[in-house]
Image: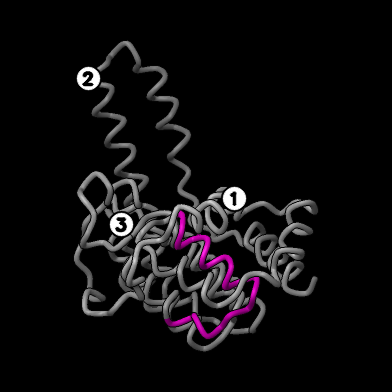
Amino acid sequence: MKKENLTNIHLHSAGATIQHKSPFEDLISYTNETNLSQEFREEWVIPFYFELNNQSDEWIKKMIELKPQINENIILQNLGDFDWRIRSTGSYFAGIKKAIQFQEIIGIHLLKSEVCYAGSEYAITLASFNTKRSVYYLNLYLEYYLTKPELYFDQGSVITALKYLDEINNTNNTEKHLKNWESLVIWRNEKQIENLNNLKKLIPDKNLELEQQIQEIKPMDTNIVISNFHKSIESLKRIING
């Protein structure tokens, strides 16, 4: 699907749930010239997009066996569609094929953030490539989107990816983003508390339940935990090396 051919309902379904302007408007996203066929979707999208975080031995074995069939054209067709499910799958395929030649496409998709949900997969793929351009795109994303806490995009996934790369490369790129990261987490927590307090006024019979939710929010944890990210990368490596 091309963005310009979609209705508002279709845009929402594709993952374009928030229309926003950013400094990356002029970057050109890779886009397919034609729509994907239903046959392609059934073979190269539908069986995969809900399984991208599957780290089971059974799934990894399946992907190792399938990997030789995944070629550049399949990856490009996935990356070129305007739908979070399809782009996420394309990014995943690029990761397991170690197709670093697509890092610019994936990096621009990340910066533009045209569809929701896909950003976390872009972050994993870029981190798995572990190139200077990977770090460049992750840094550039954080420089802007950490200053936009009202945009609930993929800031958490991206800063986790950058911290992971810092750990394995003995670098310190995350440091310069920590102040903005902490501000974003605090802003969002305060906004959530504000919303819950407003709900208490609207539905007073739920005050105890809502107050409990508020108390659970108040410890503001700004730590960046990368243990699950390590597991995602390890699963990719098992498929790559399988």
Label tally:
3
Whether 54 is drawn above or below 199: the answer is below
Q: Are marks 1 and 2 in contact (CB under 8 Å)?
A: no
Q: Badge 3: few (under 14), some or many (20 or more) residues near its Cα, within 10 Å?
A: some
Residue 52 relative to residue 157: left or right: right
| Residue 47 circle label | 1
Helix, strand, or loop for circle 1?
Answer: loop
Q: Which residues are magenta?
A: 85-104
The N terminus is located in which quarter?
A: bottom left
Check the image and report above or below for 223 versus 26: above
Task: First in sequence, mark 1 or 2: give its number.
Answer: 1
| Residue highlighted by disc 3 | 149
Inter-mark Cα distance, 1 to 3:
34 Å
Alpha carbon separation for disc pair 3 and 2: 26 Å
> Residue 98: x and y, percent?
63, 78
- Please state the horizontal and vertical placement of residue 42, each as a whole percent of the image: 53, 51
The residue lying at 76 percent from left, 67 percent from top is 238
Category of crowding for the residue at label 1, using alpha-carbon neighbours closer than 10 angstroms: few (below 14), some (14–19), many (at least 20):
few
Q: Is residue 7 left or right of residue 167?
A: left
Within the image, what quadrant is residue 116 found in?
bottom left
Residue 110: % across, % down: 39, 70
Label 3 SS: loop
Q: Residues within 10 Å of mark 2 (few under 14, many from 20)?
A: few
In the picture, the quarter occupied by the C terminus is: bottom right
- Give 167 or 43, whichever is nearer the viewer: 43
Image location (x, y in percent) of residue 140: 37, 78
Q: Kindly identify the amino acid type of the residue bearing the numbered disc 2.
A: Leu
Query: Residue 5 vs residue 34: left or right?
Result: left
| Circle on res. 202 | 2
Quick one: which residue is furthest to the top in this view? 205
Q: Nearer the viewer, residue 181 or 126?
A: 126
Is 174 drawn above or below residue 204 in the view shown?
below
